[in-house]
Image (cartoon, helix red, strand yellow):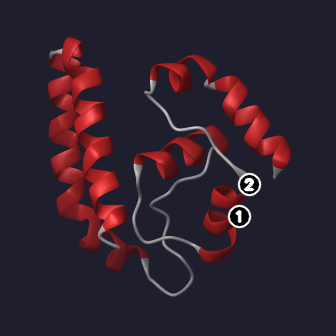
Amino acid sequence: MAECVEAFDNCYMAEISKGEKSSMNKDFISRVKNDGFKVVSQRVLDLCEFLGVNPYEADSKATISQTESQLGHLRIEFDKVEKVIRNHPDLENKIKTILRSIADIASVQGV
């Protein structure tokens, strides 16, 4: 896990120093790996992107259709956000900051 932390932090050093991404640590990676997670925060998304893992894959207990119905409405909203960013790339950093703030609030609330 230490190698993963080091590789992630080295890969995203510039973004971490600008506050655009959070650095990783062994505890966080261990929790994601062993305990699973319900909330897909920006930090989880960053780690999954780095590892090439789909954070929205259904686990063995849920079918794909159940997962799609649970996340479908959110996917529509994220598609809208992505369209705004494609049409207005200058807003990307502001939108990322807003989404990170939402994820932080959700994690503090225990969601």
User: Residue 75: x and y, percent?
Assistant: 25, 53
Asked which secondary structure carries label 1, the reply is: helix
Q: Eyeballing the image, is 105 above or below 24?
A: below
- Residues marked 2 and 1 touching at CB (< 8 Å): yes
Q: Which residue is mark 2?
A: 26
**Measured Cα–Cα span from mark 2 to mark 1:** 6 Å
Identity, as a three-letter code, of the amino acid under mark 2: Lys
Give 38 or 53, whichever is nearer the viewer. 38
Q: What residue do we see at 66% from left, 44% from top?
A: 51
Q: How many marks?
A: 2
Label 1 Cα crowd, 10 Å radius (few <14 / some 14-19 / many 20+): few
Please, which residue is most extreme toward the top here?
90
Q: Which residue is mark 1?
A: 30
Q: Eyeballing the image, is 111 above or below 2?
A: below
User: On the picture, is 91 further left or further right than 53?
Assistant: left
Label 2 Cα crowd, 10 Å radius (few <14 / some 14-19 / many 20+): some
Identity, as a three-letter code, of the amino acid under mark 1: Ser
Q: What residue do we see at 71% from left, 64% from top?
A: 30
Residue 61 image label: none
Q: What residue do we see at 15% from left, 17% from top?
A: 87
User: On the picture, is 5 further left or further right than 65?
Assistant: right
Where residue 63 sits, quadrant-wise, is: bottom left
Asked which secondary structure carries label 2, the reply is: helix
User: Residue 66: x and y, percent?
Assistant: 33, 80
User: Residue 16: x and y, percent?
Assistant: 54, 26
The C terminus lies in which quarter of the figure?
A: bottom left
